[in-house]
Amino acid sequence: MSNSAGPVRVLLVEDNPNDVEIARRALAKAAARIDLTVARDGQEALDILAGDGKGGVPLPHLILLDLNLPKVDGREVLEKVKADPKLKRIPIVILTVSAQKEDVVRCYDAGVNTFITKPIKFDDFLRAVATIDEYWVVTATLPPLE
């Protein structure tokens, strides 16, 4: 396991309640213990990452980020996180409906770690989130949060 000292903190930035619930269900079946925080828009995500989140939410080990968000777009969230010295090492997985070449290129140029187009079918989406968990939470070694 990548973080044997405790639960792996995941920040899910997603405005679609159905997608939040699917991700929650898939992560609940995780082999590792997940501490999931949900931000419903890009500004809430930036507030959490700046330490302004409700309840003093600690920094996540991993960010699952949608691109099409209210208030602050996911592309802008990605760019701000990767430009911040205290946040830039946090792996970011884009999980979005977009399959546009421009989005894929822009996100990788901005430093995203993985880009996944959300599957349309419920079971396929569950498998995609389970795959993210298997790789990023169980297999990969995540950078320390300092």
Image (spheres, helix red, strand yellow):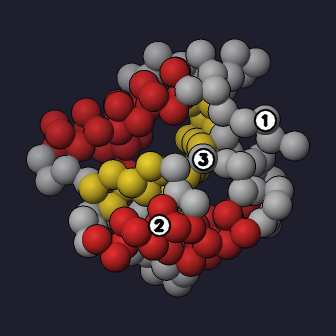
Q: Mark 2: which amino acid?
A: Cys
Distance of label 3 from label 2 (alpha carbons)? 12 Å
What residue is at 45 percent from the left and 73 percent from the top? 106
Category of crowding for the residue at label 1, using alpha-carbon neighbours closer than 10 angstroms: few (below 14), some (14–19), many (at least 20): few
Q: Disc 1 and disc 3: Cα gap in Å?
A: 11 Å
Kindly identify the residue that appears in the image at 77 percent across and 66 percent down. Answer: 84
From the top left corner, tell me how far across and down residue 69 is, in percent: 43, 75
Amino acid type of the residue tagged 1 in the rendering: Pro
Kindly report the distance in space between the C-alpha atoms of the residues bearing marks 1 and 2: 23 Å
Q: Is residue 105 visible?
A: yes
**Residue 117, horizontal then vertical, whole percent:** 27, 56
User: How far from the left and from the top, in percent, is residue 51?
Assistant: 81, 61
Q: Secondary structure at mark 3?
A: loop
Foreground: 60 or 85? 85
Residue that badge 1 annotates: 144
Q: Residue at x 68, y 22 (%)?
A: 3
Q: Earlier in the sequence, mark 1 or mark 3?
A: 3
**Pointer 3 local density, CA inside 10 Å: few below 14, some 14–19, many at least 20:** many
Q: Is residue 122 left or right of residue 139?
A: left
Give the number of the disc on residue 107.
Answer: 2
Report the residue marked by disc 3: 91
Residue at the extreme right: 146
Q: Is residue 101 above or below residue 57?
A: below
Number of the front mark, 1 or 2: 2
Indicate the secondary structure of the residue bearing disc 1: loop
- Find residue 96 and report its image quarter: bottom left
Q: Nearer the viewer, residue 7 or 107?
A: 107
Q: Earlier in the sequence, mark 1 or mark 2?
A: 2
